[in-house]
Image (cartoon, rainbow, N blue to C red):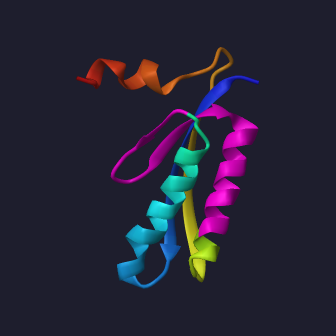
Amino acid sequence: MSIVNLSLQILPVVPEERIYPVVDRVIEMIQATGLPHVVGPLDTTIEGELEELLDIVKKAQAVCLEEGADRIVSVIKIDYKKEGVTIDEKISKYRG
């Protein structure tokens, strides 16, 4: 299968002061995968095989539950093309 980009915005339903710490744990889990990724102010974009990325989404849900979330809202965007698509081809010209 082709390399795709998946952007994940995860919104754990926890007390407001816990939102960033829970999201930080999700980002740490994503970083631990070793996959190329870019953390943005509203979502994190990850590059890899689709099945692997969907497993990361499931793990993100589990992290939120472990951290005490009663509910989790996730917004997922997937960019797929037959030849594959990379984060670098989209944003390399904007990096300094």
- Residue 92 occupies quadrant: top left
Q: Quadrant of residue 70?
A: bottom right
User: Where 15 falls versus 56 (above or below)?
Assistant: below
Q: Is residue 70 left or right of residue 1?
A: left
Instruction: Say which of 58 and 25 sits in front.
Output: 25
Residue ID at (28%, 24%): 95
Q: Which residues are magenta?
A: 36-63
Q: Is residue 78 within the magenta segment? A: no
Q: Residue at x 62, y 30 (%)?
A: 4
Task: Where is residue 73? Give x, y as percent.
Answer: 56, 68
The residue sitting at 63% across, 75% down in the picture is 66
Task: From the top left corner, tell me how far across and down residue 25 is, in percent.
Answer: 51, 63
Q: Is residue 24 above or below residue 69?
A: above
Residue 33's image quarter?
A: top right
Residue sitting at the far left: 96
User: Residue 29: x percent and y percent?
Assistant: 57, 54
List x then y, in percent, for residue 20.
39, 68
Q: Is residue 38 above or below residue 60?
A: above
Q: In the visual, does 10 lie left or right of 62?
A: left
Residue 37 shown in magenta: yes
Position of the C terminus by quadrant: top left
